[in-house]
Image: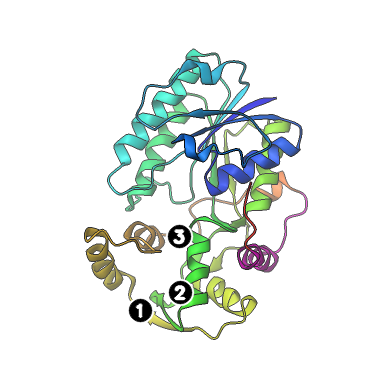
């Protein structure tokens, strides 16, 4: 199968692309600039330059059987660009003959979302539902990239860290390797009767447990101090307005505040017969970070 993945150089996009290539598929990908097509992805059959918001080139879709939408601009205030740009990609692909499309959303996507990320993903879910697309909702993806990597780095580098609201809120998790396996099964067997798949472990863990396990595996003595999440928003907003890069954004905190343990039921066990335990997922992902294992 010829599969085009948007945002192929992203942490998750790269891992999924490499996994699908290893499963025998021809993988194509889009990136924002030519520097990201430096030849490090030996398994990538074709690479295209595309910036969200630009007019899609129909050449990208020639011979493509499946389009997987990973690309997302995480810069603040880019919601409209993300929505419009992804919609344009979807419609252009359909014009180019690619009817089968998968939109990678998030557990944070919901009608009452307060984060820009959650609102954007939810708006696009509604669009892809109308376009007969397939929607995937991963939990927090564990591995050497993304938000989890930034969380682990905080534990590694700071002796004291704030624990938002005592860390009691639930966090749905899935390690990147298990996510790749699940997506590969969905692609291969066309398990699309429901059109929606919630991909995370059925056992939700608390933020406190996740960070405590990180501390244990990484052999650190980090002290976690209870801190109201809403109070943390003020200094984070100030730092963002000053243009200072920070590992955890206000959007991350807002998404965490509204997390519920009964929003979406996990369907991972329905797709994969042998799902790793949460402890195995966590320890494996931390090991990847400590070893510097990257997708290439």
User: Residue drawn 70% across and 50% down?
Assistant: 269
Q: Which residue is mark 1?
A: 227
Along the polypeptide, which appears first: circle 2 or circle 3?
2
Do the residues under discs 3 and 1 have CB atoms within 8 angstroms? no
Secondary structure mainly formed by the magenta segment? helix
Q: Counting other residues with Cα less than 10 Å from the Cα at mark 3, is it few (<14), some (14-19), or many (20 or more)?
A: some
Q: Is residue 189 left or right of residue 142?
A: right
Which residue occupies the foreground of this view, 20 or 125? 20
Residue 283 placement (x, y as % from top left): 66, 68
Residue 280 on the magenta segment: yes
Query: For numbered disc 3, what is the local secondary structure?
Result: loop
Q: Which residue is label 3 attached to?
A: 260
Distance between the Cα atoms at labels 2 and 3? 13 Å
Tell me which numbered mark, 3 or 1, is placed earlier along the sequence.
Answer: 1
What element does badge 1 sit on? strand
The dot on residue 167 is: 2
- Residue 289: x %, y % from top left: 60, 64
Residue 152 rendering spot, x and y as whole percentages? 53, 69
């Amino acid at each position: 199968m010829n599969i085009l993945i948007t945002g192929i150089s992203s942490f998750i996009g790269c891992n999924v692309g490499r996994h699908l290539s290893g499963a025998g598929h021809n993988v194509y990908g889009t990136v924002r600039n030519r520097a990201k097509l430096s030849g490090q992805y030996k398994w990538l059959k074709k690479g295209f330059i595309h910036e969200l918001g630009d007019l899609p080139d129909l050449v990208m879709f020639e011979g493509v059987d499946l389009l997987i939408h990973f690309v997302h601009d995480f810069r603040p205030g880019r919601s409209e660009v993300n929505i419009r740009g992804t919609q344009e990609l979807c419609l252009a692909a359909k014009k180019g003959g690619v009817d089968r499309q998968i939109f990678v959303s998030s557990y944070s996507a919901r009608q009452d979302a307060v984060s820009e990320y959650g609102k954007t993903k939810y708006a696009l879910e509604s669009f892809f539902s109308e376009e007969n697309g397939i929607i995937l909702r991963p939990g927090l993806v564990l591995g050497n990239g993304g938000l989890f990597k930034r969380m682990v780095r905080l534990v590694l580098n700071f002796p004291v860290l704030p624990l938002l609201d005592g860390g009691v809120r639930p966090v749905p998790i899935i390690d990147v390797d298990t996510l790749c396996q699940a997506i590969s099964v969905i692609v291969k067997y066309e398990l699309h009767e429901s059109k929606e798949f919630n991909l995370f472990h059925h056992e939700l863990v608390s933020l406190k447990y996740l960070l405590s396990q990180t501390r244990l595996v990484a052999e650190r003595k980090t002290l976690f101090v209870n801190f109201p999440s809403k109070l943390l928003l003020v200094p984070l907003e100030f730092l963002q307005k000053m243009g200072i890069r920070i590992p955890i954004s206000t959007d991350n905190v807002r998404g965490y505040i509204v997390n519920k343990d009964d929003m979406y039921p996990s369907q991972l066990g329905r797709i994969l017969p042998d799902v790793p335990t949460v402890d195995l997922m966590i320890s494996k992902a931390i090991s990847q970070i400590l070893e510097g294992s990257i997708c290439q």
